[in-house]
Amino acid sequence: MAAGQRNGKHVRRALGVIALLVCAVLVGVVTAVLGVRNHFSSGGVQSGVWATNVHIGSTGASPYLRAGVALGGLLALNASETVYYTATTDESGAALRTGCEYRVDGTEPNARWWSITAYGDDHFLIPGSNGRHSVDRAAVERGADGSFTVRVGGAPRAGNWISTGSAGASQPFSLTLRLYNPDASIVNDLAGTPLPRIVREKCS
């Protein structure tokens, strides 16, 4: 066999090995990302459109949950100190999109302090929100019965309003509800706790 043919054969083998390694790495990355994105699946609790996990902030947290908590920017306090709920869909089951307008209807949660914050698909605050990325217990306008309505979308609103950024391509986003020093009734029944409804009003 000529030297050129032998060299060509070795090159093809090397390229084949490299391709296999690249595929293996890609499969590993995709598997890890899916595991992190689905970090609420083990120990997960659903209350309406809101999801949380009983293991957040506990020694029972899996590596995927720990990575998901880090990725989501949660402080990972245990449930007696803070409960974190996240919503990625509206009441119809459709994914939350920045090109749509939503109405969040709720009543005063039984917690010392609470907030609702919008995050982009990258888990960072949505660009162009001009400081209107959240509402909280101290500033929200509520009725005498403790009920409130928060508008979520790109169009500026008076009163309770969370911005999903300036007009542009419609992108997925999520809402995170944080309950600080929640009442024991919440901690003991995460799935049965009444939480705000997220209703899609229109999409551009």
Image (spheres, rainbow, N blue to C red):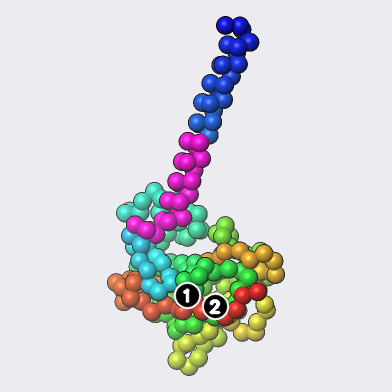
Q: Residue at x 33, y 60 (%)?
A: 43
x, y percent for residue 19: 54, 31
Residue at the limit of the structure toward the front, as seen here: 1
Disc 1 + disc 2, Cβ < 8 Å: yes
Q: Earlier in the sequence, mark 1 or mark 2?
A: 1
Q: Residue at x 54, y 78 (%)?
A: 200
Q: Quadrant of residue 38?
A: bottom left
Foreground residue among 107 and 49: 49
Q: Which residues are magenta?
A: 23-42
Give amino acid for label 1: Ser
Q: Quadrant of the N terminus?
A: top right
Q: Is residue 4 above or below residue 91?
A: above
Q: Residue furthest left?
A: 188
> Can you see residue 203?
yes
Residue holding disc 2: 200
Any magenta on residue 24? yes
Q: From the top left corner, tell me how far across and down residue 203 is, in percent.
A: 61, 75
Name the residue nearer the viewer: 196 or 198. Answer: 198
Determine which residue is flagged by label 1: 92
Which element is circle 2 on? strand
